[in-house]
Amino acid sequence: MHADGNAYGKPKCAVSLKVLSTESIHENKLQCHLETNHLNCLDKPVEFFERKLKSIRGRRNVMTAFTTKNRLALYSSYAASYQIAK
């Protein structure tokens, strides 16, 4: 199981996207989390979790691009309104 840091630097479960405690990044605690919460994933190969991690990172990149575009649009709107108000 892989854990990925979220925006706040805390580990996140690659399966449930649940934010985990910082102590839970140890292999034995990740194994315990997997056995407790994701019994159906126990026999999955490592590639399954790598794909999940890649998917999480891809979503983050899409969200970053979206918020950057919104920020630029807001700035452009503000600049145009400021010029009109002059």
Image (cartoon, rainbow, N blue to C red):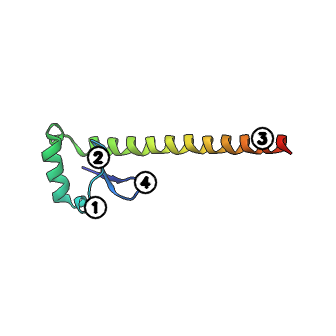
Give the labeled residue for mark 3.
81
Q: Is residue 22 above or below residue 59?
A: below
> Is 50 on the left or on the right of 80, as rendered?
left
Q: Which type of secondary structure does the marked residue at label 2 adopt?
A: loop
Give the labeled residue for mark 2.
18
| Sooner in the amino-acid sequence: mark 1 or mark 3 | 1
Residue type at the position of mark 3: Ser
Residue 68 x, y percent position in the rendering: 59, 45
Q: For the residue carrying disc 2, how many other residues have a C-alpha within 10 Å: few (<14), some (14-19), or many (20+)?
A: few
Closest to the camera, between mark 1 and mark 3, is: 3
> Is 16 on the left or on the right of 34, as rendered?
right
Residue 74 x, y percent position in the rendering: 66, 42
Residue at position x 44%, y 42% in the image = 58
Closest to the camera, between mark 3 and mark 2, is: 3
Q: Is residue 46 above or below residue 5?
A: above
> Is 59 on the left or on the right of 74, as rendered?
left
Question: Quadrant of the rendered structure where residue 28 is?
Answer: bottom left
Residue 33 x, y percent position in the rendering: 17, 50
Alpha-carbon distance for marks 1 and 3?
46 Å
Q: Nearer the viewer, residue 21 or 13?
A: 21
Give the labeled residue for mark 1.
22
Give the labeled residue for mark 4.
7
Q: Nearer the viewer, residue 73 or 64?
A: 73
| Sooner in the amino-acid sequence: mark 4 or mark 3 | 4
Q: For the residue carrying disc 4, how many other residues have a C-alpha within 10 Å: few (<14), some (14-19), or many (20+)?
A: few
Residue type at the position of mark 4: Ala
